[in-house]
Image (tube, rainbow, N blue to C red):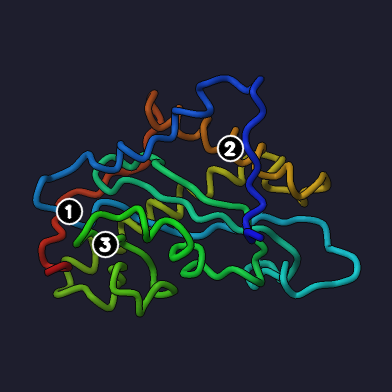
Amino acid sequence: MSLSLQLPLPLFLPLLLLFQINWIKCLIGKAHNRCLITVDGTDFRIQEPFPFSREWFSQKFTGAGVRYGVVMCIQTGEIVWFNGPFPCGLMTDIRIFRLKLKGLLLPGEKVMADKGYKGDPKTCTPFEAKNNNHKKVMCRARARHETVNGRFKTWGCLKQVWRHGRSKHVLAFNAVATITQLEIENGRPPFQVDGYEDSAFVH
């Protein structure tokens, strides 16, 4: 049985929800770059299960939560993919990455991520930066990702404790992520990461 609680979207949802967040967009970038995306986990509060289970426990807010892995294109700052929800206490960021996203990467491709992803050969963390300038660019890309994660939580349904069925959380997240992506495309993009060049990170 899969640990993911993600459900198929109901047929009545607009087709926009199905196609706005598009993995192909991550291929936008310099042809010689092999690190095209950033990945990060983001947690959301849910009601405490009864009886208590540490499988849902999030260290980020010391309570029950669900976690999504979110992927953004480094060159454009657009959301290109997500996976979840998963129980916070059961699925670390790197486990979510290895569950599916890792298998989507092209040969030789890596993802830019924070130190929680250290140790996987398909990730590029601050420990792999070759000099201070490259480290600053990596930090800026990851900070932008955190900014977009923060936009999700400006919506009450994701900011507050989720009090509906856990299996329905993905519907709210999908809607908010799609609206956020539409904002990015239509006049409210996150800050750009200038001077990005990944040839020093991957060989």
**Which kind of residue does numbered mark 3 sit on?**
Lys
Disc nearest the viewer among 3 and 1: 3
Query: In the rendered image, which residue does mark 1 sit on?
Result: 196
SS of the residue at dot 1?
Answer: loop
Instruction: Sort mark 3 into few (<14), some (14-19) or many (20+) by Cα contacts within 10 Å.
Output: many
**Disc 2 element:** helix
**What percent of the width, then of the height, locates residue 136?**
24, 65
* Residue 7 in which image quadrant: top right
Residue at image x 30%, y 55%? 105
Name the amino acid, label 1.
Tyr
| Residue 80 in the image, given as x and y percentages of width and height | 39, 41
In the rendered view, does 79 fall on the left or right side of 65?
A: left
| Residue positioned 41% across, 50% down in the render | 71
Q: Real-space Cα distance between discs 3 and 2?
A: 25 Å
* Callout 3–callout 1 Cβ contact below 8 Å: no
Q: Which residue is mark 2?
A: 174
The residue to which callout 3 is attached is 110
Disc 2 packing (10 Å; few <14; some 14–19; many ≥20): some
